[in-house]
Image: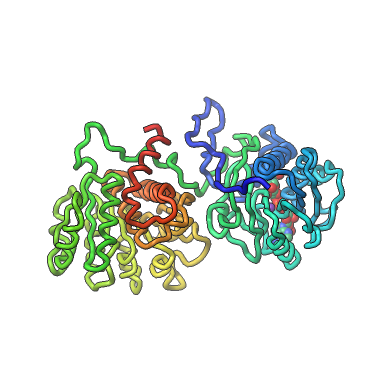
Amino acid sequence: MSARPSVPEPSGRAGDTPPRAGAPARLSPHALLSPAQMAAADRAAPAAGVSGARLMAAAGAAVAREIRARWTPTPVVVLCGPGNNGGDGFVVARLLRDAGWPVRVALWGGRDALRADAARAADAWSGPVEPAGSGCLAGAGLIVDALLGAGLSRAPDETLRALIHAVNEAGAPVCAIDVPTGLDGADGRCPGAAVQADLTVTFCRRKPGHLLLPGRALCGALVCADIGMPAAALERLVPEVHANHPDLWSDVFPWPRADGHKYRRGHALVVGGDRMLGASRLACLAAARIGAGLVTLATPPAAWAIQAGALTSVMVEALPPDGALDQTLADPRRNALLIGPGLGRAPGGRGQVLALLAAGRACVLDADALSVFADRPAALLDALHGRCVLTPHEGEFARLFNPGPDAAGTAGDKRHRACAAARRGGAVVVLKGADTVIAAPDGRCVINDNAPATLATAGSGDVLAGGIAGLLAAGMPPFEAACAAVWLHGLAAGRLGPGLLAEDLPGALPGALAALAGLTGT
Ligand SMILES: NC(=O)C1=CN([C@@H]2O[C@H](COP(=O)(O)OP(=O)(O)OC[C@H]3O[C@@H](n4cnc5c(N)ncnc54)[C@H](OP(=O)(O)O)[C@@H]3O)[C@@H](O)[C@H]2O)[C@@H](O)CC1
Ligand SMILES: [K+]
């Protein structure tokens, strides 16, 4: 077998071309469509001049092409289900056999259940069709999962679960068509059991379930193939969520201007605590590296000497013993505020958070700045305003948004929980994780997919919070600043590779910024 699939590569390219006069607007390549939206596009395609059969032929051809690009000929078992996903499987089987691969087809369900395009694709397969069961996988060098597509209508029943387990235990690589069977393309969840794929080939646009965990991990490498879906079939779709990409925010990225001045690039104020001093330093360095013109760390007097000795370009000032912030906030040029990294749970923390919020400036709340409100979330949520960004991980999120039966973020998948929380707080919510979701109170939502596993390390959240504060200081709007900082954070980590420590990240930001500049032609 040749090299295994490795790099996820959505087919969408950066930079949409503007539509010609009279032509339908082009849906962003970063739009994530729900299975229901994709099905609507499917239904609309014939009226726009592209038949379902043509789409199925293109889908099957794309899957066969991706398989042949990754594996050398090997005995293939194509598992086909009762719908159009199964129809795609029959097309793949025919194309691989025509290319000289040994191919067997196993059908889950009766031949009579196949309808329309899927039935015609099955008719075009002239080889034998076995019943799908664990026995049919013997000798497979590659399994093609064409059992179910993205619109999982219910949890797999016992027989399907047994088949899924057999696929996962067969020891052969798996190429899933559209989604690994059992994964819900809408939300990345798998109620029951799901195929673990090495490669997933989806069509037209990705779905949220391809990016959200556990779905992302089940897909293996992800390819989104262009199958010639007509733009007119997509024009009525309003995507609710996008994959994070500079196309979404590069137009407001605050690159330093030739006629610039450090105060024009903003002044980030980080309020630190007297424990975990490194956390606030990481945040300060990230804020400075990502674009703030000045950064000040306001610190309890006991920590001043240590912090001042450890920082050079970042200014360090001592707060009064009671932690009052009026003096440090007196300078209105301190236009972006951050509190949380290294704050600790000391009693004065709540008052400091509320004082920063009362200043009405752009403000990032992270870590303990959120947790100190665990017993009275409403006191925080009611004080938030539209220029706030909250950066909870799942634990901090649960403490704020899940404390009671009428809580904002209790139910649903990660995307819906983040969106509900952003609406409740009237602020941007960055719900962190390997599949970070960024949600705005106006309903915009982005899922990030460039974070390597190495980012799960102490201090990386402090760097992210500082990065967002730095971009806010430099003038970026809150939602875009959050998306950009999350993306740069992931890129910087990816460039560092294994062995990453959080203290490496601020130093890796210039390289990530240079890559961003190259990508956006800045
Ligand atoms: N979009 C595009 O651009 C293109 C899409 N194409 C392809 O079409 C695929 C979507 O096709 P599709 O709508 O027929 O869905 P698919 O999953 O094959 O079958 C549905 C059947 O499964 C059943 N079923 C569901 N859950 C079940 C469960 N848990 N356990 C048991 N059964 C379950 C469900 O049963 P029901 O709920 O109706 O009882 C129904 O009978 C898509 O994934 C892609 O591969 C390309 O061909 C062309 C371009
Ligand atoms: K599938």
In this orientation, which residue lies closer to the viewer: 287 or 512?
512
- The residue sitting at the top extreme is 21
| Residue 91 shows in the view | yes
In this orientation, which residue lies closer to the viewer: 226 or 102?
102
Horizontal arrangement in the rendering, residue 491 relative to residue 104 (left or right): left
Residue found at x 59% / y 39%: 234
| Residue 117 shows in the view | no
Residue found at x 70% / y 38%: 58
Q: Toward which corner of the image does residue 367 lie, by quadrant? A: bottom left
Residue found at x 58% / y 55%: 186
In this orientation, which residue lies closer to the viewer: 11 or 397?
11
How far across and down, in percent of the image, does residue 248 sit? 43, 42
Residue found at x 72% / y 60%: 170
How far across and down, in percent of the image, does residue 38 sit? 62, 46
Identify the image's colour scheme: rainbow, by chain, secondary structure or one colour: rainbow
Horizontal arrangement in the rendering, residue 445 relative to residue 193 (left or right): left
Horizontal arrangement in the rendering, residue 418 relative to residue 160 (left or right): left
How far across and down, in percent of the image, does residue 257 sit? 26, 34
In this orientation, which residue lies closer to the viewer: 49 or 152?
152
Q: Toward which corner of the image does residue 49 lie, by quadrant? A: top right
**Quadrant where the image shows the C terminus:** top left
The total of numbered circles placed on residues is 0
Horizontal arrangement in the rendering, residue 225 relative to residue 473 (left or right): right
Q: Is residue 230 above or below residue 196?
A: above
Q: In this view, does 381 lie above or below 487?
A: below
Q: Is residue 328 above or below residue 37?
A: below
How far across and down, in percent of the image, does residue 350 sit? 26, 68
